[in-house]
């Protein structure tokens, strides 16, 4: 690690601790030449690409995943911290699989499965945007898939 003050290439770690808010390791370092101290943050490089519906690629961004899930979970019993934990679990699962590329369809299905297990209202909200329902019948079909035992009155939706 190069010193940001004198560019010397040797430094020693004086303290390490978790920086949970940014999912990193915080390291206090001291330059072996000028003896000045500086802080570095060490994170895992996911380098995962998401293949979009139109065929283009973009970097996987956990913050984008959190934003989309937050929107679906707004006004439910799921807290922002729970959303962050779900996003972290999804990212960790993808890293454990060792994939370099994932389709947006597969990623959306993974998110929907997690939301379905956590809160059905959040699942339906996310599914509405993700699956781009064209009419109320598609929405009712999605609701019936999670609550087949409940009778839904289609007249209510007309």
Image (cartoon, helix red, strand yellow):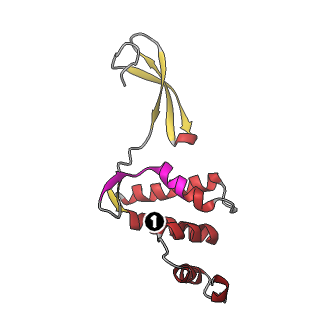
Circle 1 packing at 10 Å, graded few (<14), some (14-19), many (20+), is some
**Residue name at image x 61 percent, y 66 percent:** 122
**How many marks overall?**
1
Answer above or below: position of 46 versus 31.
below
- Residue 39 is situated, as x and y percent measured from the top left of the image, at 49, 25
Q: Residue 120 versus residue 158: which sits nearer the camera?
A: 158
Queried whether the magenta region covers residue 64, the answer comes back as yes
Q: Residue 54 versus residue 79: which sits nearer the camera?
A: 54
**Residue name at image x 36 percent, y 20 percent:** 10
- Residue 144 appearing in the image: yes
- Residue 3 is situated, as x and y percent measured from the top left of the image, at 39, 19
Residue closest to the far front: 158
Left or right of 145, for residue 55: left
Quadrant in the picture for the N terminus: top left
Q: Over which residues does the magenta segment extend?
A: 56-68
Left or right of 120, for residue 2: left
When asked about the image quadrant of residue 104, the answer is bottom left
- Residue 158 is situated, as x and y percent measured from the top left of the image, at 63, 84
Queried whether the magenta region covers residue 66, the answer comes back as yes
Q: Which residue is mark 1?
A: 108
**Residue name at image x 40 percent, y 55 percent:** 95
- Residue 153 appearing in the image: no
**Residue name at image x 63 percent, y 70 percent:** 121
Left or right of 73, for residue 6: left
Q: Secondary structure at mark 1?
A: helix
- Residue 97 is situated, as x and y percent measured from the top left of the image, at 38, 60
Residue closest to the far top: 34
When asked about the image quadrant of residue 55, the answer is bottom left
Q: Residue 91 versus residue 80: which sits nearer the camera?
A: 80
Answer above or below: position of 118 versus 13.
below
Answer above or below: position of 151 versus 47.
below
């Amino acid at each position: 690690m190069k010193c940001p003050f004198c560019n010397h290439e040797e430094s020693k770690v004086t303290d390490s601790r978790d920086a949970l808010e940014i999912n990193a390791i915080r390291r206090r370092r001291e330059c072996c030449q000028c003896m000045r101290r500086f802080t570095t943050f060490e994170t895992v490089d996911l380098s995962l690409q998401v293949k979009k519906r139109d065929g283009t690629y973009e970097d996987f961004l956990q913050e984008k995943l959190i934003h989309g899930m937050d929107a679906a979970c707004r006004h439910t019993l799921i807290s922002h911290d729970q959303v962050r934990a779900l996003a972290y679990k999804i990212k960790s699962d993808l890293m454990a699989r060792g994939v370099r590329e994932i389709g947006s369809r597969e990623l959306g299905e993974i998110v929907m499965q997690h939301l379905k297990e956590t809160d059905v209202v959040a699942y339906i909200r996310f599914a509405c945007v993700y699956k781009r329902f064209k009419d109320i019948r598609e929405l009712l079909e999605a609701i019936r898939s999670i609550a087949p035992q409940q009778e839904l009155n289609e007249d209510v939706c007309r």
